[in-house]
Amino acid sequence: MSTPELTAPTGSGASCGCAEYAAVSRRGLLRGMGAAALTWSVGSAVVSAAGPALAATSTSTATDGSVVVVLSLRGAADGLSLVVPHGDPAYYAARPRIAVPAEKLLVPDGFFGLHPSLEPLLPLWRAGRLAGVHGTGLPVVNRSHFAAMEAVEDAAPGSTERVGWLNRLLGELPGSSPLQGLAAGRAEVPTSLFGPEPVMGFRSLERTRIAGDDKWDPNGTRVRSLERMWKRSSDPMGRAFRSAMAAVDDLEPARAQADRSAAYPDDDLGRALASVARTLRGDVGVSLVTVDHGDWDMHTDLGTLGWGRMRREAGSLASGIAAFFDDLGPVADRVTLVTVSEFGRRVAENANHGLDHGWGTVMLLAGAGVRGGYHGSWTPLGTGLDADVPVTTDYRSVLAEVVAARTPASPAVVFPGFQRERVGAMLGQ
């Protein structure tokens, strides 16, 4: 008989030029951080449990059905490549080999332009539903992938509680189903969803089932045995199992939706976003989604428009997001997507056609409620080897606008002790 297994969140990412990032990906984002909460995995279903607040059944959604999708660009994405400050001469002086030529940029204004590999996003841009906020990041420089990821996803500096900002947001929304908070493309939950509110993670919508519920047990004998075992248990394991059972059953309307994954890029991001779109079309009560993308730790071979890792990752990102919003159909009017990365890259290229750990980066927003265009204030770049992109907008101000515009929650609760500044990337903010 299969039994639930205790697990901890793990990062994504394949090989990269940074030993620390590779180690984070291998050992999991929460190893060594203490047992403030537990994540119980039953097959591919995951529920975070930390005390009696965990509920086992009800499914609900935000009052207007809005959905926030947080897309994490793991490994520290170079914002200067994605949204190029062609109006700052220091950009070209610092990157003689890897800078994107101004004449190749998409939708340039007098200062910024998009990387050519983001071309699939042009329909969203022209519809006023795509925005870029430059100079975003942590208020204090942190070049450690592990520590920066934790800081970004906790979003509560100085707190001793291990609760992610999305879990705090879940606590402000109506309902208590694990399906409200979903980590797609992985069977573990990231730090942002870690905490007392129930959440769920799956690698694939099709493979989301209780361990033992498979072709070798067509009559469901083992699953019924598990149900009897945990039916009256009041400990966290029992409550987690019952919650997982209910969540897996509640996903049936999503599985009944048409599988349109063939329209997505054939990569991890495409497969994850296809599952997310299918789930949202099934209207099963999802309010928040997290998805991880790629290996943006480009110490080497970031490359040019003709070759390299930036061209590949940016193309995957753009094609996946474009396919996602097309796939959603009318549901797209309820969905807002925002990208985050733990930090950016240095201004100056290194000897390996790459970039070392930096500070500020860019955040992209797409979909419902977005005020399209380029946002954020800009401080002129330096050209020295240690020059950083200055952070002029705390990333929490961007996320707080999304929270305020698209959910009934209070940003002051989601980001405790933080006084947000206006960014203007969301309508009504």
Image (spheres, grey):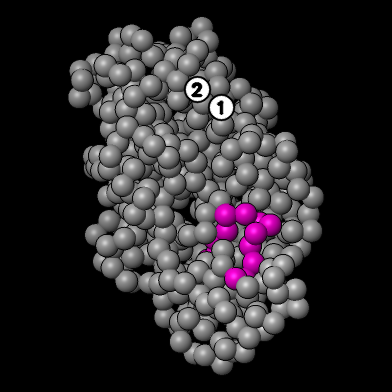
Q: Circle 1 — which element? A: helix
Find out whether residue 210 is within the magenta segment: yes
Which residue is painted at 79% across and 50% down in the image?
258
Which residue is painted at 76% across and 78% down in the image?
219
Crowd rating for badge 2 (residues with CA inside 10 Å; few <14, some 14–19, many 20+) = many
State the image coordinates of residue 123 (x, y, percent, origin top left). Answer: 68, 27
Which residue is painted at 62% across and 89% down in the image?
228
State the image coordinates of residue 4 (x, y, percent, origin top left). Answer: 50, 75
Specify whether residue 110 is in view: no
Residue 304's label in the rendered image is none
- The vertical placement of 238 against 292, above or below, is below
Asked whether 253 or 93 is in front, the reply is 253
Q: Is residue 36 left or right of residue 86?
A: left
Q: Circle 2 — which element? A: helix
Query: Residue furthest toward the bottom?
Result: 232
Asked whether 184 or 289 is in front, the reply is 184
Crowd rating for badge 1 (residues with CA inside 10 Å; few <14, some 14–19, many 20+) = many
Amino acid under disc 1: Gly
What quarter of the picture does the N terminus occupy? bottom right
Q: Main secondary structure of the magenta part?
A: loop
Q: Is residue 36 left or right of residue 223?
A: left
Q: Which residues are magenta?
A: 199-211
Residue 311's label in the rendered image is 2
Q: Are marks 1 and 2 in contact (CB under 8 Å)?
A: yes
Dividing the picture into quadrants, the one containing residue 329 is top right
State the image coordinates of residue 324 (x, y, percent, origin top left). Answer: 66, 41
Asked whether 320 or 332 is in front, the reply is 320
Disc 1 and disc 2: Cα gap in Å?
6 Å
Which residue is painted at 33% across and 49% down in the image?
24
Specify whether residue 34 is in view: yes
Query: Label 1: which residue?
Result: 315
